[in-house]
Amino acid sequence: MRTSIVASLPVYNIGDLEKIKRIDADFIELRLDYMDKLEVNLDSLNEYRSKLIFTIRDKSEGGYKEIPDAEKSAFLKELYSKGFLYDIEASFLQRELVPHKGKIVSAHYFDHIPSFEELEDIIRKYREAYIIKFALVGKENYREILIKLLRYENIAVMPMNVDPLERIAFSILGSKLIYGYVDIPTASGQMHYKDIKRIFQLLANY
Ligand SMILES: O=C1C[C@@](O)(C(=O)O)C[C@@H](O)[C@@H]1O
């Protein structure tokens, strides 16, 4: 099964949701942490349900604006009740009780490389997730750690702050997701999602 392409879209206001219809990717990540208030009419997005990933990224893990935990938790529970897919940090799950079964559980490291054992603990703890995702800054032994993680089944790995082509390599090695940008990168090390599509189409011809 090939890696799924995620087009990551910052949502500053409701008007940005109009862009969804023009994005042709496996998934569209809606980064709602770019909004001042989490005011989205979820029923209006039902037709896109199968391709949406909702993310309200904590500032401590690369988020854009500070969203209070209680507001984020309430919105995630509404997403759960309506059957939408969302991304939730393992660190947030330590603070708030929100369902993670069948969802994306993620962990991001910007200033250090964690031990492999620390990441294995996350995998064991959240093994009922749809996908467990690790984003590591490109320093020290990040490649070794990311490659070792791919021995597990439902894993997505991505390096940050390195040549975006490295993400293609991790896709070939088995990462379940690869993130690209639509207008502006939502993390350092992304390429445009259409360039990922072109590379995958070329690879499919060999
Ligand atoms: O967790 C991730 C991965 C990411 O940080 C990246 O490195 O492409 C981009 C984020 O929008 C997404 O939620």
Image (tube, grey):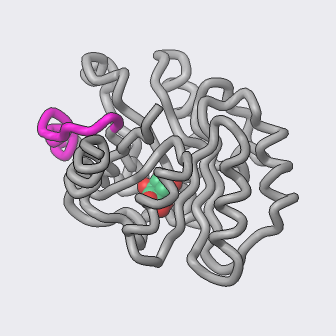
Q: Residue at x 29, y 58 (%)?
A: 181
Q: Residue at x 41, y 58 (%)?
A: 168
Residue 37, percent from left and from top: 38, 47
Q: Is residue 96 left or right of residue 5?
A: right
Residue 92, percent from left and from top: 69, 49
Residue 159, percent from left and from top: 53, 67
In the rendered image, is residue 96 in sight? yes
Q: Is residue 115 left or right of residue 134?
A: right
Residue 66, percent from left and from top: 51, 61
Q: Is residue 22 left or right of residue 151?
A: left
Taking 17 as reference, is 173 above or below it? below
Q: Residue 183: which quarter of the image?
A: bottom left
Q: Residue at x 72, y 46 (%)?
A: 151
Q: Residue 104: which quarter of the image?
A: top right
Taking 30 as reference, is 34 above or below it? below
Question: Count the marks: how many?
Answer: 0
- Tell whether position 66 is magenta: no
Q: Is residue 77 left or right of residue 21?
A: right
Taking 117 as reference, is 102 above or below it? above
Q: Residue 130: which quarter of the image?
A: top right
